[in-house]
Amino acid sequence: MEFTKVAEKNELLPNTMKMVVVGGKEVLISNVGGEFFAIANKCTHLGGSLAKGSLEGGIVTCPRHHAQFDAKTGQAVAEAKLGFIKMKVKDEPSYEVKVEGDSILVGMNE
């Protein structure tokens, strides 16, 4: 697995997130209580940018239809909502993260 430096730790305060590009893929990096995690940035419902959503309690909410994903695992925890209609969503791919010194690195399988 190849790791790519994507950010410095001081760029992501606790309970914040940021979109980066790794190997041509949009990846959402989040700081959940001082730990760093990475999942795909595109919502599995209609492709909304999760980086434009919110992060609360380790849960990422898509700004389009409010689908929710666990920032640590990418697991879908709430369906997308369009009015009173709920729509199932798939889990987000997750990626390995490691910290070396002040650098945050994301691992992508080639």
Image (cartoon, helix red, strand yellow):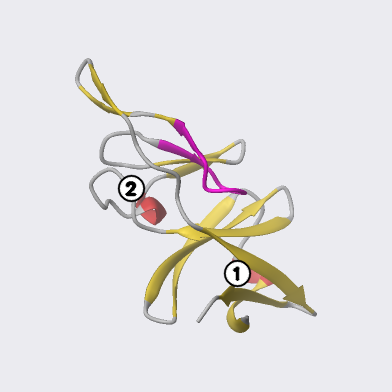
Task: Identify the residue position indicated by label 2 in the image.
Answer: 44
Q: Position of residue 86 (x, y in %)?
A: 27, 22
**Amino acid type at mark 2:** Thr
Task: Identify the residue position indicated by label 1 in the image.
Answer: 11
Q: Quadrant of residue 65?
A: top left
Q: Position of residue 21 (x, y in %)?
A: 42, 76
Q: Report the side of 10 relative to 87 (left or right).
A: right
Q: Is residue 71 above or below residue 80?
A: below
Instruction: Give the crowd class for mark 2: few <14, some 14-19, many >=20 residues within 10 Å.
Output: many
Residue at image location 45% in from the left, 66% down from the top: 27
Residue at image location 48% in from the left, 56% down from the top: 93
**Front position in the image: 25 or 7:** 25
**Front position in the image: 26 or 14:** 26
Quadrant where the N terminus is found in the figure: bottom right
Q: Which is more foreground, mark 1 or mark 2?
A: 2
User: Is 75 a magenta residue?
Assistant: yes
Farthest-out residue, right: 101
Residue at image location 45% in from the left, 43% down from the top: 54
Nearer the N terminus, badge 1 or badge 2? 1
Q: Position of residue 71 (x, y in %)?
A: 56, 47
Instruction: Give the crowd class for mark 1: few <14, some 14-19, many >=20 residues within 10 Å.
Output: some
Farthest-out residue, top: 84
**Amino acid type at mark 1:** Glu
Q: Is residue 74 above or below residue 89?
A: below
Q: Position of residue 7 (x, y in %)?
A: 59, 76
Q: Quadrant of residue 31?
A: bottom right
Q: Report the side of 14 relative to 43 (left or right).
A: right
Q: Secondary structure at mark 2?
A: loop
Q: Which residues are magenta?
A: 68-77
**Front position in the image: 94 or 63:** 94
Q: Which mark is residue 21?
A: none
